[in-house]
């Protein structure tokens, strides 16, 4: 299993910007009220008290600035930059310090989850609370498509970029003009069954399953109605 080190923090984003759990070392002072941070520590099975003990142990203060709360280097922060300069740290020194914070978190989490430290660090590197997503949006009235990037947290989508694409083909536009977009909630158990049909290759998408199910249901209701009327 690959062993994680401070170099894995190079280019890492904050948790709230779509970074992996390795980036918990970049969390800011507002952690108590931050739902992303709360979801992160809940996933790791550590407490706020554990985090605050790490904070006491790992804080490095310079000119009134605590580097424990410093963001990644690609985020502008004059306080961080001044503190690093006064400490005569290099970029690698800063990232090594931050990675030690992540290791402290991983150490507690590994004990609480009964796994090795390395296994926990690898799990953290593959886990995100805020997900990166690729967006595809279609204006059904004009037929113009849009594509872009975004961040997804729970059921909240933040659009980062969105650009217009060429108009969709006439065939697709014709098909779409005869449809309506309907939003509704489906029980999770039923959705898993639908997904299973897609996984087995019986249907190409969730939409296909639902349309076929609705057609069958309405047909049976139609037959049932006429059967009842004949009996009457």
Image: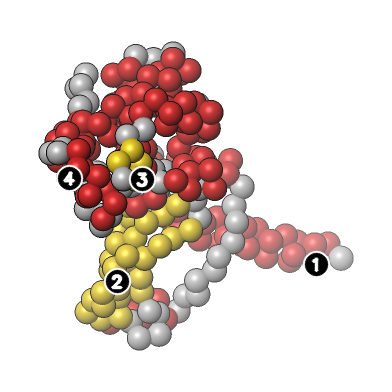
Query: What secondary structure is marked by label 4?
Result: helix
Of the image marks 3 and 2, the number of the one nearer the N terminus:
3
Is any atom of residue 35 visible in this view?
Answer: no
Left or right: 166, with 49 as reference point:
left
| Residues at discs 1 and 3 in contact (Cβ within 8 Å) | no
- Indicate which disc, 1 or 3, sits on the residue closer to the N terminus: 3
Residue shown at the point (48%, 18%) measured from the top left: 112
Disc 2/disc 4 C-alpha distance (Å): 38 Å
In the picture, the quarter occupied by the C terminus is bottom right
Q: Which residue is mark 3?
A: 64
Q: Position of residue 140 (x, y in %)?
A: 40, 80
Q: Which residue sits at x=83%, y=62%?
A: 231
* N-term mark: 2 or 4: 4
* Helix, strand or loop for disc 2: strand
Q: CA distance from mark 1 to mark 3?
A: 84 Å
Q: Nearer the viewer, mark 1 or mark 2?
A: 2
Where residue 162 is drawn, which disc sits there? 2
> What SS does tag 1 mark?
helix
> Which residue is under mark 4?
85
- Residue 119 image point, x, y percent: 31, 20
Task: Residue 136: name its quadrant.
Answer: bottom left
Q: Give the labeled residue for mark 1.
A: 229
């Amino acid at each position: 299993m690959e062993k994680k080190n401070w170099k894995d923090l190079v280019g890492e984003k904050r948790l709230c910007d779509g970074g992996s759990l390795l980036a918990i070392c970049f969390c800011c002072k507002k952690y108590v009220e931050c739902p992303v941070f709360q979801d992160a520590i809940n996933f790791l099975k550590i407490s706020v008290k554990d985090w605050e003990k790490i904070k006491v142990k790992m804080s490095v203060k310079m000119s009134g600035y605590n580097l424990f709360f410093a963001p990644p280097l690609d985020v502008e922060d004059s306080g961080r930059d001044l503190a690093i300069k006064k400490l005569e740290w290099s970029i690698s020194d800063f990232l090594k310090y931050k990675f030690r914070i992540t290791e402290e978190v991983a150490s507690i989490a590994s004990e609480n989850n009964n796994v090795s430290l390395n296994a926990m660090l690898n799990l953290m590197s593959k886990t995100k609370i805020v997900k990166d997503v690729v967006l595809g949006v279609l204006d059904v009235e004009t037929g113009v498509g849009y594509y872009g990037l975004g961040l997804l947290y729970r059921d909240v989508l933040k659009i980062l970029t969105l650009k217009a694409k060429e108009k969709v083909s006439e065939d697709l536009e014709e098909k779409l003009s005869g449809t309506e977009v309907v939003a509704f909630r489906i029980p999770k158990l039923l959705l898993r069954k639908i997904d299973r049909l897609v996984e087995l290759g019986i249907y190409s998408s969730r939409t296909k399953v639902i349309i076929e199910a609705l057609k069958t249901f309405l047909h049976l209701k139609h037959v049932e109605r006429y059967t009842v009327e004949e009996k009457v």
